[in-house]
Amino acid sequence: LPEEEVASGVTVVDDDNQNSYTLETVLRRDIDLHTMIYASYTFVGGRDYSFDGAGRVTGIYVEEGDAVNVGDMLATLSSYDSYNSQYTQYTQSLERLESELEAKRQESTLAYEELEIYHKYGEVTDRDYVLTLRQYADDYDDQIARMEDEITILKLRIEHAKAGLAGSVIYAENSGIVSYAMNLGNSGYDWQTGRNRGKYVDENTTVVSIGQ
């Protein structure tokens, strides 16, 4: 930076000390002398995004300079597709089973109502039919109990899939401009399957930064 344009608090590094750098806030000005360095940056008031746990990043859905809004998908891990498929499958199965359970409960109610009527007004010759109705009612009870157990298990699986999804995808929690987006390149490319296995990251690795 020209001497008269050095921002307050900025450390000026000379050639003799070029290996020593500090994190500073600078003003955007003309550059008289420039040196090639590698650095990460973000806008003041911005936010860095990373995953809650380690994994392989297989999807980065924004580029530097993109404008994003709250809720936009930013990045996913390799586990995202699996968890998303599980969540969709279990949710659909739950909806179907709950519908079947409601129908089964209605059938059970009708069976018990008809059984009650025959208990009150049926002829002695109807004894076999009454026994048949009783068997139907008992069968309905057993089926309803099994379906309720299946629904309980499905709900637990849905919660597990939701937790997995939450940990394998990043959504924007602030609006702004993307100042950094991880470049996946061909990292982890599997030549046998033709698929990108993704770039390994841990919970401290920034994959996207958004400035205000």
Image: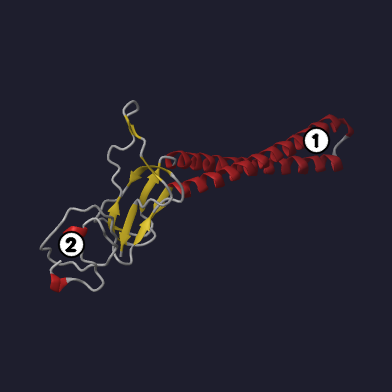
Choose top left, top right, bottom left or bottom right for residue 190. Answer: top left
Mark 1 nearby-residue class (10 Å; few <14, some 14–19, many ≥20): some
Counting from the top left corner in percent of width and height, residue 176 is at 30, 62
Judged left or right of residue 93, residue 210 is left
Quadrant of image for the N terminus: bottom left
Choose top left, top right, bottom left or bottom right for residue 45. Answer: bottom left
Q: Earlier in the sequence, mark 2 or mark 1?
A: 2
Counting from the top left corner in percent of width and height, residue 205 is at 38, 50
Cβ–Cβ under 8 Å for marks 2 and 1: no
Classify mark 1: helix, strand or loop: helix
Residue under the point 24% across and 74% down: 8
Classify mark 2: helix, strand or loop: loop
Judged left or right of residue 65, residue 99 is right
Quadrant of image for the C terminus: bottom left
Alpha-carbon span between mark 2 and mark 1: 94 Å
Name the residue that disc number 2 marks.
Answer: 14
Asked if 191 appears above or below 66 in the picture, the reply is above
Q: Between 139 and 18, which is closer to the camera in this rendering? A: 18
Residue under the point 57% across and 42% down: 157
Residue under the point 20% across and 63% down: 13
The amino acid marked with disc number 2 is: Asp
Residue under the point 36% across and 58% down: 48
The amino acid marked with disc number 1 is: Arg
Asked if 192 appears above or below 90 in the picture, the reply is above
Q: Between 165 and 124, which is closer to the camera in this rendering? A: 165
- Mark 2 vs mark 1, foreground winner is 2
Name the residue that disc number 1 marks.
Answer: 134
Counting from the top left corner in percent of width and height, residue 77 is at 40, 43
Q: Residue furthest right?
A: 124
Asked if 35 appears above or below 157 in the picture, the reply is below
Q: Which mark is residue 126?
A: none
Judged left or right of residue 116, residue 79 is left
